[in-house]
Amino acid sequence: MVTRGQARPTLRDVAERAGVSVSTASLVFSGKGPVAEATGDRVRAAAAELGFTGPNPLASSLRQGRSGAIGVLVEGRLRMAFRDPFAIAVLDGLAEVLETVPTGMLLIGQPTGAGESVVPQLAPLALDAVVFSLCGPGENPAVEHLAARGIPMFSTGVPGDRRITQVRVDERAAGVAIAEHVRSLGHRRVAHVAMPMLPTSEAGPVPDAEVRPGEANVPSVGRLLGFRDVFGANAPAVQTGDGSSFEGGRIAGRALLDVPEDERPTAIVTQSDVIAAGVIVAAEELGLRVPDDLSVTGFDGVDLPWLPHRITTMDQRGREKGRILGTLVRKRLDGTRPRSVTQPVDLRVGTTTAPPA
């Protein structure tokens, strides 16, 4: 056993004790090659006698030119990501592929409205790649820092920098598709509940200055533009102040629905299933029935088993999106330069939409 002050045993020490070559001992620990069972037992016994717990991971990473860690940037506080079922699905799919590399994920929260504060966090970290995993701003100060260090970057559409390999959704086209579904049911008095247009946006009506057509790749902007392509720029649109949250949807829903009946929308198109759930609960608190009195749509395609409705939504298959991201990362680590891809989305009609009463 290793005692205090004694040098840490090496793989060479184990090989000499077991009477095998260093390469054979290495194969035993890596499990990547055929080694006779008796030889493996002898190597493991020698390691136990010497107190050898395995190859030095730092030395191994230096030899391979890898750190063994993928940074995953999450906008806002990390606890918000773990409350969002779509975010969890994306991370689950990403982890599923990265486990086969193998490599680990390091989750890093990027404060909303203060994105530059993440750069000092990234500076001392050795990372093989960075993934921008969720909805975020169109521009991110971390991009220049990572590009200068030559760290490969991947994202789900934002930031929209050409140096980032993307798994995109045509946000505007998806917004048009779900708005057209609502219109085809006969709804004409329709409102929209969006995620924040900008990191600094506040809850309430969406200011025209914050809707920038050139940033249609940003989910909140693209989905709102798609809605307006169908219902016009004068259709009511409000945004939450805290991203894709249930409580943000509930507050926005009450603001749109707690008005005289002749002013109340007959349908509300939202930008996430979690926001849609908040709107549905707000409607029911006001005595409205979904979908009899109000139709509601979401976006993402997540399952909310606690909600007694199956939301009509645009399904972008979060777990599959994460797996695609992981595959792109794995290809880059293997030495190839994968291209950005556009992921299709599908309209999934549920129980929350119907023709207006």
Image: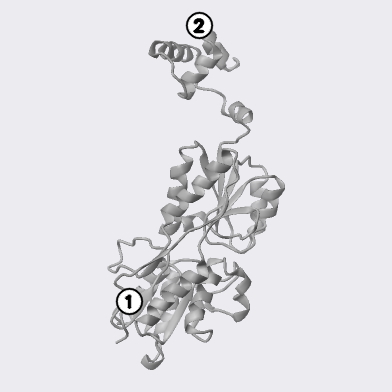
Question: In the image, 145: left or right of 78?
Answer: right
Vertical arrangement, residue 38 with respect to residue 136, above or below? above
- Secondary structure of the residue carrying tag 2 is loop
1 or 2: tag closer to the N-terminus: 2
Q: How many marks?
A: 2
Which of these two is toward me, 300 or 252? 300
Q: Is residue 9 visible?
A: no
Colour mapping used in the image: one colour
What amino acid does circle 2 point to? Gly
What residue is rendered at 59% in x and 80% in y? 207
**Residue shown at the point (51%, 9%) measured from the top left:** 20
Residue that carries the numbered disc 1 in the rendered image: 353
Residue at x-position 54% and y-position 23%:
55
Label 1 CA crowd tier, 10 Å (few <14, some 14–19, many 20+):
many
Where residue 177 sits: x, y (%)? 44, 73
Residue 64 location (% of width, % of height): 61, 30
Q: Is residue 225 above or below residue 74?
A: below
Image coordinates of residue 119 in percent, x first then y, are 67, 51
Give the quarter of the image for residue 37: top left
Q: Nearer the viewer, residue 138 or 181?
A: 181
Q: Amino acid at mark 1?
A: Thr
Question: Is there a contact, CB below 8 Å, between mark 1 and mark 2?
Answer: no
Residue that carries the numbered disc 2 in the rendered image: 19
Secondary structure beneath dot 1 equals loop
* Place of residue 66 in the rendered image (x, y in percent of width and height, measured from the top left): 60, 35
Residue drawn at (63%, 78%) of the image: 209
